[in-house]
Amino acid sequence: MTISASVEFNPVVEEIEAIHRVIGPMSEQGEWTPDVTYQIELILEELCINVINHGEPDGSKPIKVEIACDEDLITIHILDNGKQFDPTSDVGTPEKVQSIEESTIGGWGVHLARVFSDEMHYQRIDNMNHLTLVKRRSG
């Protein structure tokens, strides 16, 4: 059985909560493990905040997140009209730090999405960023 959901929200940080309102029920219905639920929420939150903070979307179109889940895979599509950015290209890994005092805010969103997803695909279509992530539910 495939279940799916989508959510659209204005490109402002205060509206990121819309993601959690979709993920919670979908996680329960799809019987996701707590780890998978956490990873999906983190990926979506980090990538959408990156769009808002760095993508400079003009606000004319909402950020759209579509999620589909079957027995084996969770597939996520993120669409936005921010400036072109391909997170599948080599954007580097954040620098490792030895203490919290050395750490800086930022730079981890794309890295976490790469670590927690099994596939990432990017396309630029009609001035829109189309990012697809796939996560295997097991293994």
Image (cartoon, rainbow, N blue to C red):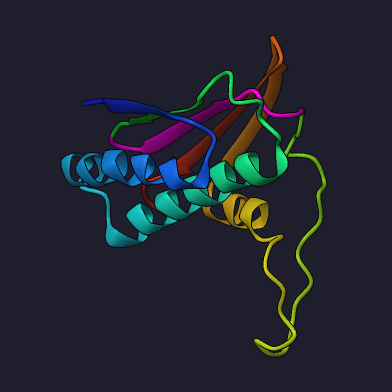
Left/right of residue 83 with respect to residue 23 in the rendered view: right
> In the displayed image of the protein, which residue is found farthest to the left?
29
Q: Please identify the quarter of the rendering in which residue 92 is found.
A: bottom right
Does residue 100 belong to the magenta stretch?
Answer: no
Which image quarter holds the C terminus? bottom left
Q: Is residue 18 above or below residue 65?
A: below
Q: Is residue 83 above or below residue 54?
A: above
Residue displayed at 72% across by 89% down: 98
Q: Is residue 101 above or below residue 44?
A: below
Residue displayed at 77% across by 28% down: 84
Q: Is residue 118 shown to the viewer in this render?
A: no
Left/right of residue 36 with respect to residue 110 in the rendered view: left
Residue displayed at 20% across by 42% down: 25
**Nearer to the camera, 45 or 88:** 45
Expressed as whole percent of the image width and height from the top left, the position of residue 94 reads 76, 65
Q: Please identify the quarter of the rendering in which residue 21 is found.
A: top left
Q: Is residue 19 shown to the viewer in this render?
A: yes
**Nearer to the camera, 71 or 111:** 111
Which secondary structure type mostly characterizes the magenta part of the structure?
strand
Expressed as whole percent of the image width and height from the top left, the position of residue 61 reads 55, 19
**Nearer to the camera, 39 or 126:** 126
Q: Which residues are magenta?
A: 71-83
Does residue 72 belong to the magenta stretch?
Answer: yes
Q: Is residue 16 above or below residue 70?
A: below
Which image quarter holds the N terminus? top left
Expressed as whole percent of the image width and height from the top left, the position of residue 64 reads 47, 26
**Nearer to the camera, 63 or 123:** 63
Residue displayed at 71% across by 60% down: 107
So how many labels did they put on this image? 0
